[in-house]
Image: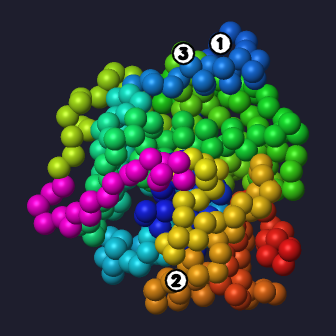
Amino acid sequence: MNKNAKRWIPAAVVPVVIATAAVALPVAADASPALPEKTAGQVLELIATSAGTAYSGTIEQTSDLGLPDLSALGQPDGSGGGDAASNALELVSGSHTARVFVGGADTQRLQVLDSMAERNVVRNGDSVWFYDSSTKEAVHATSEVTAQLPTGSAVSPAEAAEKLLAAVEPSTTVEVVETARVAGRAAYQLRLTPSDDTLVGTVTLSVDAETGLPLEASITAKGQDAAAFSVGFSSIDYSAPDAALFDFTPPAGTSVTEKSITDADLAQAKAHADSLPETPTGLAPVVIGDGWDAIVELPAGSYAPDAGSSDLLAQLTDKVDGGRAIGTSLVSVLVTDDGRVLAGAVGIAQLQAAASR
């Protein structure tokens, strides 16, 4: 997942999205195709060869954390547009659809389709647009830096796979378990089984047998049979997308904020590649531990909820020693009495222990 996902969501729930990496609907697979046998190492090498692949497709997305369905939060007609916390939590409950277009290493577009609105992230060379039709607001970021720039809240199976593979440790079991057909493509299924003290039971990556592109990534919590999170293509086309798709012009009436990404900004983002970007107050988050049971801590003062966010937080969390917490099948979040926010794919007790260290 790209690290600028926080553009769309408040600090209190950023760790929920970051720790889970992706949320999506498992794509129905046809009968297992016959493919040449490959080792886990060979499938990982196949994934590495997929960089730069051009494609377009539809991603179906859902989550089942045990949270209530928040898809109708916001406007009375259920069209969204509620406060930031409502919008963020809606992303980790219910189902969602997105269209993704990748023309190459420096041209990408993601359209997240809401019930009556959409969010767009468009990258074309050194120009990146972030647009939300519900608020009629856009951010235009530019940079002369030639390295790959962050593209906002873009989430694809490939990005999810990259994040999940980054959590693999020597103690993680990595194996090829079977073949499948996803979005009409024959795929190898790679299973990762952590041995850490984490809520993650297994991770399954479906990898296109021909291109190496991850077509689906799903996470199953310990003790569960169904995936708690999964992101996958329902359709995919390997033809190069029309170049015009990457030329974005904000609609009339859009409020546009111009930003410039400097070399220093990019260096700072790289320094926090496995954590979150800086908080709104400029206070950098702390990552405690590594691998599957890593915990992200946002310092006191980095989260200043508006009234709606505060009310929603109170409704969804329970009072615990040291603060308020919410625990799901896969992710836990603790807001301490002194204002810190801790989150990770671990139990609430582990967050409390980390908070008191």
* Cα gap from disc 2 to disc 3, whole angstroms: 48 Å
Residue 202 place in picture, x, y as percent: 76, 44
Pair 3/1: label in front: 3
- Which segment did they paint magenta? 250-268
Residue 28 place in picture, x, y as percent: 55, 37
Residue 256 place in picture, x, y as percent: 22, 63
Question: Which kind of residue does numbered mark 1 sit on?
Answer: Leu
- What count of labels does the image hold? 3
Question: Which kind of residue does numbered mark 3 sit on?
Answer: Glu
Q: Is residue 157 magenta?
A: no
Report the residue marked by disc 3: 210
Image point (73%, 44%), residue name: 167
Q: Nearer the viewer, residue 268 or 219?
A: 268
Q: Residue furthest front?
A: 264
Q: Nearer the viewer, residue 165 or 278?
A: 278
Q: Residue furthest left?
A: 252
Report the residue marked by disc 1: 35
Label 2 sits on a secondary structure element that is: loop
Pair 2/3: label in front: 2
Image point (18%, 55%), residue name: 250
Report the residue marked by disc 2: 304
Label 1 sits on a secondary structure element that is: loop
Q: Residues within 10 Å of mark 1 (few under 14, many from 20)?
A: few
Image point (38%, 77%), residue name: 82
* Cα gap from disc 2 to disc 1, whole angstroms: 53 Å
Residue 73 place in picture, x, y as percent: 43, 76
Residue 265 in view of the camera: yes
Residue 70 in view of the camera: no
